Image (cartoon, helix red, strand yellow):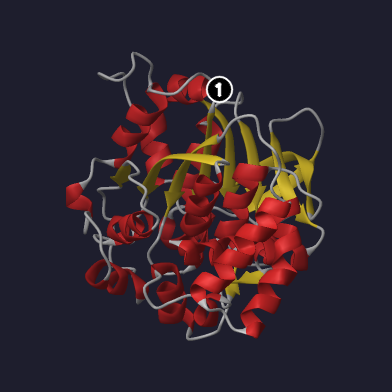
Amino acid sequence: FINRAMAFGCFCLRFNFNLEAMALLMKLLPWMVLAAPTVASSVRLIIDTDMSTDCDDVAAVCIANALHNRGEVDLIGVVHNTGLEQGIGAVSVLNTFYNHKVPLGAYMGNFDSNLSGPYVPDLVNNYPTPIHNRSEVPEAWKMYRQLLASQPDASVTIASIGFTTNMELLLKSPADEHSPLNGVDLVAAKVAHVAWMGGKYPTSKGSTPEWNFGANGIGPSTAYTFDHWPSATKLTFLGWFTGHEVETGGVMTDKLPPSNPCRQAYIDYNGPGKSRYSWDPMTTLFAVRGLQPFWTTVAGTNHVNASDGSNYWTNSSGTNQEYIHLLDASAVTDVINGLLLEASEM
């Protein structure tokens, strides 16, 4: 703890933080320290993101990079799951900012190809990156196969924070030069856990299907992926209502420099000083740290309607499925904001 405190003091002096910023970080420090468990080995993580409109995908990739710096994560790959040309370029900007060379892949179809928020072109056109569009990376399902085949059995965690386009194609993939296994068998062999942002719990009845499960006709893909995903893999769902209870990211406006692309994405999307709901960073945090004092899980079975992606949940024990139930929104907020502010050390 003493070493952490000394490092924290040097950190503040280096960046000439004002008293308000120091007070905020002192508030966050206990959660930054205590909420980081001692782990025997890093979580081998693949992020599957629809980085295009909402800026919470940015927060997810940024905190994954921060956790990588902490040694809690081995970020082995990031894939993009919509047809947006520059989406994977924005991912590359973030990884480049953190000085991480992470294998990338992109969906090559047309789903949501015209759906773009303001931050993607801003990041790709104005921040350093070796990758600018999807033509410069492999197809995502092929990258999935390459990454999974190279990892030990039952060792990979996937943070699914978007649509199921890539996961569906992975399941349907045949044997190739990377593995003699088909997609379903490869997933069963290599993937231990999927933290999946999607659905509404306990039910979406009486409202529209959740975005990642049902938007723009994605429902059949969602249902196929869910129905064919191997039962050997643990599935943890974070639903729309849960992510809506936590708002993060606004602290970056005043506490981080303009050179930080995570900060800029939030300003582009929301305006200065404004936070955003935290569906994707919460899902990514759970993928890495699992159960924490600020949330628990409910075991049971998810039921996904193949026509529109609507869903409902039945409680039961002995399944491979659970959804996250939030206990302390303020505590989660502090942890995510703390990880985002660690980017100021770059």
Query: Quarter of the image holding residue 277?
Result: bottom right
Q: State left or right for residue 103 relative to residue 42.
A: left
Residues 256 and 132: in front is 256
Q: Look at 56% across and 35% down and name the residue there.
A: 42
Q: State left or right for residue 16 relative to residue 166.
A: right
Q: Is residue 164 visible?
A: yes
State the residue lying farthest toward the left: 135
Q: Look at 33% across and 55% down and name the residue there.
A: 96
Residue 67 at x, y percent in the picture = 55, 49
Q: Tell me the kind of residue under disc 1.
A: Ala
Residues 116 and 246: in front is 246
Q: Which quarter of the rendering shows the C terminus?
A: bottom left
Residue 214 at x, y percent in the picture = 51, 57
**Residue at numbered disc 1:** 154
Question: Could you classify mark 1 by the number of other residues whose Cα lies within 10 Å: few (under 14), some (14-19), or many (20 or more)?
Answer: some
Residues 28 and 52: in front is 28
Q: Count every numbered label the image shows and give the total.
A: 1
Q: Is residue 307 visible?
A: no
Residue 68 at x, y percent in the picture = 50, 46
Q: Look at 41% across and 73% down and name the residue there.
A: 265
Residue 52 at x, y percent in the picture = 37, 65
Q: Secondary structure at mark 1?
A: loop
Q: Look at 65% across and 67% down and name the residue there.
A: 207
Q: Is residue 107 above or below residue 116?
A: above
